Amino acid sequence: MTPSFFTAPSDQAVAGATALSDQMDLMGQAAARHAERLGHGHAERAREWFRRGQAVMARLGGAAAAGTLPDLIAAYARDAAERGVLTLDALRERGNNDIAHQAEGTPPVLVYDYETVVDGAGLRRPVNYMLLRILPPAGVEVNDRKRPYVIIDPRAGHGAGIGGFKADSQVGVALHAGHPVYFVAFRPHPEPGQTLADVTFAEGEFIRTIARRHPDSPKPIVVGNCQGGWATLLLAATNPDLTGPLVINGAPVATWSGRIGESPMRYNGGLLGGVLPALVLSDLGGGEFDGAHLVSNFEMLNPARNYFGKYYDLYADVDGAREKFLEFERWWGGYHFMNEAEIHWIVEQLFVGNRLARGEARLERGRPVDIRQIRSPIIVFASRGDNITPPQQALNWIADAYADEHEIKIRGQRIVYMVHDKVGHLGIFVSSSIARREHTEVTSTLQTIEALAPGLYEMRIDDQVGEGIHAHFTVSFHERRMEDVRHIDGSHRREEVAFAAVDRLSRLGAEVYDMALRPARRAAVTPVSVEAFRELHPGRVGRLAFSDRNPLVGPVAAAADRIRAERKPVPADHPVRQMERLWADAVEQSLDLMRDVRDAWFELAFLGLHMSPVMQMLGRSHNLERTRADSRELHRLPEVQTILAGIERGGLAEGVIRMLVLLAHARGSVRRDRLERSSEVMSRQEPFTTLGPQERVMIIHEQTVIVEFERARAIETLPKLIRTPAERRRALQLVDYIAGPAAEMEPHTVETLAAMREALKRKTLEVVAPPAGKTGTAA
């Protein structure tokens, strides 16, 4: 018999060879995708550029032949000079706006009036957060009995207000639907000693305050944007009894996830030192981390746009784009700060450690945070055009938190996700088209989502009728399995072991810095150095250099006023202006090419270093996953067995809900009109109105588990629940009304409905109007 110490090296060699094979395979995939983007994408753009260039040169040649070229050049030269002065004036006003905004305390950039309801500085655990009540504009009526909306904006370097940045916004959609709207905002500087646990506590107090202000309303809907999304999950996981449905927009929760050949931002931690830069920058900032550093990270994702494109767009249409530019820049330059403890927790627990998605995040005193404790329905909105929070980061936490879709049902949870094809990260919050379409439909759907059976669903907007603000959409919910979520990530997440190695090295680096270097670093920091470090940040210098603080900018305002009084712009189709546009496109593509080469190098360097066999072995102890139970184990869970033991217990309410769950299970999807009819019946018809919302939710949960694990018996035992002929007639009337005409049903649905009728020994009933019944209060 061979001693074990001879076999162990062989096992290690096999493991090392497998790790090396994975590394080479992933690097090959990354190189191929980057090469395709660099070759095909830029080649197509170059061909289009040359095609346009030939057309412009032909026009200029024609003008030269006609003798009008000198006049065209002279008119363009004057226009270009005028636009240059007007652009400088816009930059001057931007700098002045920054100074004035900072002098005001950097208030939220909301377009709506508001009042402060709770100032977090006065709470038992003080924070720089505030709860604001949005005041409806003239002509908009709000019903205080309707479910309140609470919007939590991201604290990711900028100030608050992006969710109410425009009239067509998340705030605007909710207000026009008649809902009271509250906004969670924050001041630039945190309170001394403030932590993320304190912030979560404060947000819980805000929700309790709203509940007291609206005692006759259902629990508030909480909307979390970007980093406000994971903050919303923290709030709901630690206070599962407080919130109503959650809407999570573009939130990075599964931060290790992404797609090979894309998602470059996720590699920053591995190549820039993990949590160490955040600690060093916090120490240089006197204990506060400057949000300008986070904004710079976002800008570097698309340097062509942020350092050239947006300024050229202003220059090209300075007469029409000035106000829009200044409006956005007021928010973009409103830098905010975090305490060292806050940024440390965010980077270590989320972006480097990915612990929230895996159930390992800890708040104060080691308190665990488990997303599975959330009882409120969750709607997740992601986009394939989002390079800050790709769909994998927005959705993979579902696969990390739950064993499969069966566990979601067992826990009585409803998770609905929607993936947009094109919109970018900020477009999720500020795009008018998104507000009028996706946010409008989400707002409308939230009124009925609690009538949806527990499970995992994809929400689709299938059809549109009408245009603009009068448009209506057909929405459907399609039941999904966990494989559908995992399918979004084509790499099967094999590269995530490399991030586990980064996590381990990051912790080691932070400990070494904390013990060996931090005392000396802190001793060298003075108030003067802190102020200089902040003011000399390139983001601030580049903006304030064009303000009135710079004496060289003084003559610009007067010159701009004279130009505006006599302005005669040349049209955009002017041939020399088209040459200018070609030049700008060439500059932008050159910067895009540099970015794409940088991203390719970043990814290949990361995979080459952290996917090596040694690093995979180093990260194995930190690449932990939840224990995943199969369906048989889930069937044996005590809570499942308890529910199944009551399969024959109940009455008309339980029987009708079971029949609706059976139909939904057979269809695999639910149209919103059916969901609305179901919500109408359960909120306005007996025997449901006397149950109360929580009891209705509990019955839906129990009947979903019964149908999930004992579908055949669920049908067979219906007569045990619905006993008398009158009750059976009533049950079928309600089900027929909710399900709609048989002609619109799928074959499986028709078969299920027939099986239930057979069990109840009733013939088909044609119902075209709501069944009569006692009307109760709408939920």
Image (cartoon, grey):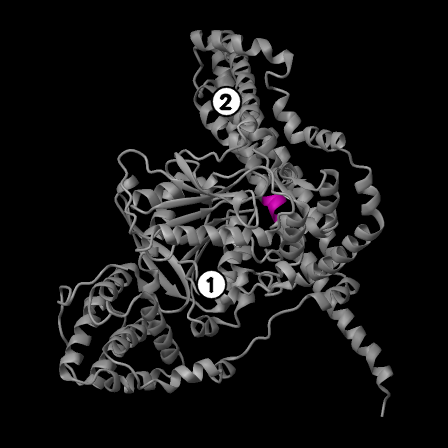
Residue corresponding to mark 2? 316
Left or right position of 676 against 127: left
Q: Nearer the viewer, residue 312 or 164?
A: 164
Q: Secondary structure at mark 1?
A: loop
Residue corresponding to mark 1? 240
Q: Percent x, y for residue 611?
A: 73, 60
| Residue 347 in the image: above or below residue 732 | above
Name the amino acid, label 1.
Pro
Q: Which residues are magenta?
A: 35-40
| Residue 96 in the image: above or below residue 589 | above
Q: Say which residue appears at 70% left-offset and 60% top-offset.
A: 498
Mark nearer the N terminus (1 vs 2): 1
Q: Main secondary structure of the magenta part?
A: helix
Image quarter of residue 99: top right
Q: Is residue 670 visible?
A: yes
Q: Percent x, y for residue 48?
A: 52, 34
Give the farthest residue toward the bottom.
1
